[in-house]
Amino acid sequence: GAVVSQHPSWVICKSGTSVKIECRSLDFQATTMFWYRQFPKQSLMLMATSNEGSKATYEQGVEKDKFLINHASLTLSTLTVTSAHPEDSSFYICSARAGLAALAKNIQYFGAGTRLSVL
Amino acid sequence: DAKTTQPPSMDCAEGRAANLPCNHSTISGNEYVYWYRQIHSQGPQYIIHGLKNNETNEMASLIITEDRKSSTLILPHATLRDTAVYYCIVSTGANNLFFGTGTRLTVIP
């Protein structure tokens, strides 16, 4: 299967600082990437969808000025948590999907996730 | 996206087949059935998907009923490493994946 690399896997930061998380599709071009958040003992919740070269589409309740998403190339998307606070501590997961016409048949491939702890 | 219903938890003896059911009675004609699993503290892993016909790959088999209102994921010989939360999702593929609560499968030695 296709490989999606997410970095870092774990980050601890002080309250008020910004954290950048990278998501790379290693062996395919991802026209669309997704960012999810998962709190303990809960399921994944979609935060935003980004298409290469376009502005991200955020889900209701997700602050676009706080969670900055950039999808500048077909293999890289970044999520920046700006002015992080303890309530932003969570497990952030990205996924990537090849173009609809690709043999990947619209499958989303997920990164390993980033555990963010804000002190 | 259509919603799915899965049992919250299941146990399976190691080496036996694990059969995970999923109801999706409101599935649309152009929606696929996808299965993912999430092992603790990792990102979800794609397992298999199908539209109408049964599907099989190196990981599992997917049985979809003729009316497409339900499906079963079959892990033919469960191992301890198959312990995970399994998500059944219906989607056109062009839109988002909605993750419900899934089924927590525990493989018992």
Image (cartoon, coloured by chain):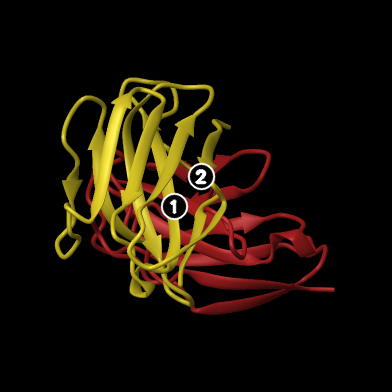
Chain colours: A yellow, B red
Q: Which quarter of the rendering shows the N terminus of chain B?
A: bottom left
- Three-letter amino acid code of the residue under disc 2: Gly
Secondary structure found at label 1: strand
Relative to A109, is B105 on the left or the right?
Answer: right
Local crowd at mark 1 within 10 Å, few (<14), some, or many (≥20)? Answer: many
Name the disc covering residue A93, or none. Answer: 1
x%, y% of residue B105?
Answer: 62, 71
x%, y% of residue B104?
Answer: 57, 73
Residue denoted by label 2: A111
Residue at 34 percent of width and 38 percent of height: A33
Q: Is residue A77 above or below residue A75?
A: below
Residue at 34 percent of width and 45 percent of height: A79
Secondary structure found at label 2: loop
Q: Is residue B54 above or below residue A18?
A: above
Relative to B80, is A19 on the left or the right?
Answer: left
Relative to A61, is B108 on the left or the right?
Answer: right
How many numbered tags mark residues here?
2
x%, y% of residue A14?
Answer: 43, 65
- Three-letter amino acid code of the residue under disc 1: Ile
x%, y% of residue A59?
Answer: 18, 56
